[in-house]
């Protein structure tokens, strides 16, 4: 297809063909990271800025590696060591960075919609690396890529997204992408962690993991985001873990070929037992590997 989009802000706005094109393009970039010399000249001369206002290990590192493997120059800026701490606004920060002739800004921010705002302030491409509780499009894409790789097709797949749905940008990007590609999505959590009106996104809601675990092809397990919860939304971590933690015993009730996923970072012993993290059906590190290829594909499509 003829790619026209300049920014990647969320999966809500992407057409099915665009999502499939990113996934197909990722297939061709994955092999580069397995070579002895992991570099191609595709984006030579382009400059990409990582602008992160929240902590990150996977997203920030894999965007940087993706850019370097495509021969782009990269700069990483964290809000804590920038002039943001002196009171400089997001708009001024971005426009000053852009004045240094850069081509793309990859941004993570605690405010939903911050990358959308930025895309209206600068001429560079803007990529959303996670905005508040709203979207994390490249995580959604790498999750869907991993499901497609392992299960062959997304259409008809039954996916349970388990945990802190209310605060999860990963859940929202997964839901948009999976529903567009024809999956059945069930969100599983205590009522206090299910946002009002989530059914309007086309998902089913279930409050019991035990009811669902034997019926689904994929479990995508989310981290409990205590840093975003303004008050206690469940009695205790122990209580949450007892009802929603994926344990070895619970996994025995699942289909034999279930795929177990987690975007990371994992709270071991809370949402997932250590033994489950090490189960051969759990693909957390393969998700991370695929994240580099997804981000190479996204950078290539936006900046070519
Ligand atoms: N999955 C994810 O976004 O991880 P980081 O917060 O480490 O980037």
Image: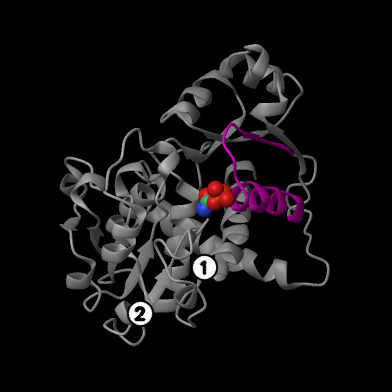
- In the picture provided, is 55 more to the left or to the right than 164? right
Instruction: Specify few, some or many for label 1: CA neighbours under 10 Å numbering under 14, 14-19, or 20 or more.
Output: many
In this figure, what is the number of numbered marks? 2
Helix, strand or loop status at disc 2: loop
> What residue span does the magenta drawing correspond to?
47-69
Q: Which mark is residue 240?
A: none
For label 2, the residue is 258
Q: Disc 1 beta carbon < 8 A from ligand 1?
A: no
Is residue 277 visible in the rendered structure shown here?
Answer: yes
How has the structure been colored for display? one colour
Is residue 181 visible in the rendered structure shown here?
Answer: no
Residue 133, given in percent of the width and then of the height, sits at: 38, 38
Is residue 206 shown in magenta? no
Q: Residue at x 25, y 56 (%)?
A: 189
Residue 137, given in percent of the width and then of the height, sits at: 45, 47
Give the alpha-carbon distance from disc 2 to disc 1, as whole Å. Answer: 13 Å
Q: Is residue 54 above or below residue 92?
A: below
- In the picture provided, is 144 more to the left or to the right than 197? right
Instruction: Specify few, some or many for label 2: CA neighbours under 10 Å numbering under 14, 14-19, or 20 or more.
Output: some
Towards the viewer: 64 or 281: 281
């Amino acid at each position: 297809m003829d790619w026209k989009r300049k920014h990647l802000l969320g999966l809500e706005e992407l057409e099915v063909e665009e999502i499939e094109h990113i996934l197909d393009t990722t297939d061709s970039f994955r092999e580069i990271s397995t070579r002895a010399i992991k570099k191609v000249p595709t984006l030579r001369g382009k400059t990409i800025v990582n602008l992160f206002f929240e902590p990150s290990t996977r997203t920030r590192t894999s965007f940087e590696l993706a850019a370097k493997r495509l021969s782009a120059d990269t700069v990483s800026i964290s809000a804590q060591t920038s002039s943001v701490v002196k009171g400089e606004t997001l708009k001024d920060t971005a426009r000053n960075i852009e004045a240094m002739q850069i081509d793309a800004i990859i941004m993570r921010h605690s405010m939903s919609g911050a990358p959308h705002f930025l895309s209206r302030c600068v001429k560079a491409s803007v990529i959303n690396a996670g905005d508040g509780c709203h979207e994390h499009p490249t995580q959604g894409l790498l999750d869907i890529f991993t499901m497609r790789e392992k299960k062959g097709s997304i259409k008809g797949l039954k996916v349970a997204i388990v945990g802190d749905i209310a605060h999860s940008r990963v859940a929202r990007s997964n839901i948009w992408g999976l529903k567009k590609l024809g999956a059945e999505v069930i969100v599983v959590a205590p009522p206090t962690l299910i946002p009002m009106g989530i059914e309007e996104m086309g998902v089913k809601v279930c409050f019991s993991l035990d009811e669902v675990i034997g019926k689904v092809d994929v479990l995508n397990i989310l981290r409990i985001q205590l840093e975003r919860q303004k008050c206690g939304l469940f009695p205790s971590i122990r209580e949450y873990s007892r009802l929603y933690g994926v344990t070895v015993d619970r996994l025995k009730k699942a289909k034999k070929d279930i795929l177990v996923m987690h975007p990371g970072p994992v709270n071991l012993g809370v949402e997932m037992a250590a033994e489950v993290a090490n189960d051969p059906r759990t693909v957390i590190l393969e998700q991370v590997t695929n994240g580099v290829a997804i981000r190479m594909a996204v950078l290539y499509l936006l900046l070519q």
